[in-house]
């Protein structure tokens, strides 16, 4: 079992930056693929970024490629999402998610992930 708690959301102007953190509890974090998803009002939850257990493999949605960076610190049981050059269309609730430790591929579907945090709001103003 993995429990996830996101933090770092807030209000920022377009062009600004934010760093989201996701603190995980559970013995399997260091072996778990981690992902970030987001959901804007009236829209489906969508993939943002994912990282494998070692940090050596990452995936990004085309919409954030080159602006967002996912990373992890297994010693701190934490995964991060550095968001730069933020746009108004990045406004959403951002969720951290974890795959079961038996899965090694950074999946991009919500169905790939077994554990979810409660979400943190990111609002980008123009």
Image (cartoon, grey):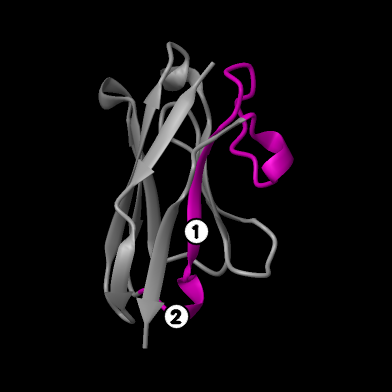
Q: Which residue is drawn at 26% across and 21% down?
A: 75
Relative side of 27 to 98, left or right = left
Find residue 49 and report its horizontal and vertical position in percent: 51, 51
Tag 2: Cα neighbours inside 10 Å, few (<14), some, or many (≥20)?
some
Secondary structure beneath dot 1 equals strand
Q: Which residue is drawn at 64% across and 23% down?
A: 103
Relative side of 54 to 50, left or right = left
Secondary structure beneath dot 2 equals helix
Tag 1: Cα neighbours inside 10 Å, few (<14), some, or many (≥20)?
some
User: Is residue 78 or residue 102 the one in the foreground?
Assistant: 78
Instruction: Return the residue at label 1.
Output: 93
Q: Which of marks 1 and 2 is nearer the N terminus?
A: 2
The reply to whether residue 58 is visible in this rendering is no
Q: In which quarter of the image is residue 9?
A: bottom left
Q: What stretch is highlighted in magenta?
A: 86-114
Instruction: Return the residue at label 2.
Output: 88
User: Does the stretch in magenta take in 47?
Assistant: no
């Amino acid at each position: 079992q993995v429990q996830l708690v996101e933090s770092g959301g807030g209000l920022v102007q377009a062009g600004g930056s934010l760093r989201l953190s996701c603190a995980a509890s559970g013995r399997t974090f260091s072996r778990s693929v981690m992902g970030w998803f987001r959901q804007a009002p009236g829209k489906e939850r969508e993939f943002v970024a994912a990282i494998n257990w070692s940090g050596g493999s990452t995936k990004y949605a085309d919409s954030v490629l080159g602006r967002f960076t996912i990373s992890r610190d297994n010693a701190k049981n934490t995964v991060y999402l550095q968001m730069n050059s933020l746009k108004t269309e990045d406004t959403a609730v951002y969720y951290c998610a974890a795959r079961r430790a038996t899965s090694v591929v950074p999946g991009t579907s919500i169905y790939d992930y077994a554990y979810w945090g409660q979400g943190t709001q990111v609002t980008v103003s123009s």
